[in-house]
Image (cartoon, rainbow, N blue to C red):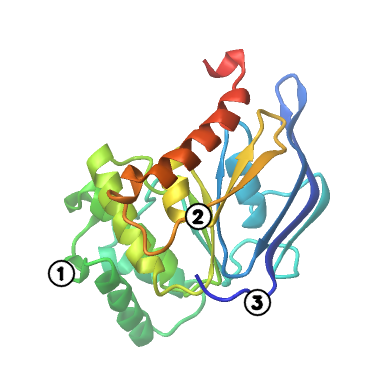
Amino acid sequence: MGPSLGLAIDAENVCLWLNGSKGPVEILKKVNLRVRAGEYVAIVGPSGSGKTMFLSAVAGLEKITSGGLKVFGKTPVPEDPKIGFAMSRDALLPWRTARGNVELSLEALGVPASERRMRAEQALAQVDLLAYADVYRAQLSQGMRQRVALARTLVTNPSLLLLDEPFAALDAQTRILMQERLMKLLGSYEGTVFLVTHDISEAILLADRVIVFSHRPASIAKEIQIPLPRPRSAVHSRSTPEFQKIYEEIWSQLSREFTAEDL
């Protein structure tokens, strides 16, 4: 994790309502959260509590109803080059090669073709997929697709990396391998990571701090510091008493937030 250089995310009394079939629905209720630049923070919470909605607001893709939300001191806007957003599905374009999909992020920034190719290949090499640069989505495994999507997000060198359940579509074994790979990649990353996940272990492995959202309308029920030393292992860290203690603390709080609709 890089040094603290101020605030990456500053949310003050963030409220968000959406129009439902039976009228307005309250999603977020007075969310107050500050994330320091260089910090890694994960959000866990019941399904439908508004985790992804909050992440989308940080990305500038969803407007808040009231309160204040700043990203690096400014109101977030879509396609901010400082923000990289990796979604739960790879969303790769099937008519583009792996290289072409990674280049897509650079095209949006107006990067010249020769530089796009070079940077895309460097990003693919980071995720050990340079040999598959000319392969199309249909010929890639699900794990490979997620790695291409991760390369596409990292190729712009974002200051804030937003991850929305990035490995949710993977089987259990591949997910552990991807967590291990991501932690190695982040070892040289000096930006901020903001992660939404249903996987408590994943949150503990990746984060410096875990935020537990309440049931909807969501507010912050608890913040838990993760004092585990880095580097961490997706396999070995799970077996330590310290990891298990943190897991139980998060689960204890999270279990209180479930309602009858979640069961």
- First in residue order: circle 3 vs circle 2: 3
Number of other residues with Cα within 10 Å of mark 2, as a class: few under 14, some 14 to 19, many 20 or more = many
**With 78 as the anchor, is 10 left or right in this view?**
right
Place of residue 95 in the rendered image (x, y in percent of width and height, measured from the top left): 28, 57
Residue 131 is labelled as 1
What separation in Å lies between label 2 and label 1 (alpha carbons)? 31 Å
Seen in the picture, residue 256 relative to 90 is either above or below; the reply is above
Give residue 37's position: percent from left, percent from top: 62, 69
Viewer can see residue 171: no
**Which amino acid type is marked by label 3?**
Leu
**Which amino acid lies under the numbered mark 2 shown in the image of this protein?**
Ala
Numbered circle sitting on residue 5: 3
Q: Nearer the viewer, mark 3 or mark 1?
A: 3
Circle 3 sits in a helix, a strand or a loop, which is it?
Answer: loop
202 horizontally vs 5: left or right: left
228 is higher (above) or lower (below) than 118 = above
Q: Are marks 3 and 2 in contact (CB under 8 Å)?
A: no
Q: Which mark is residue 207?
A: 2
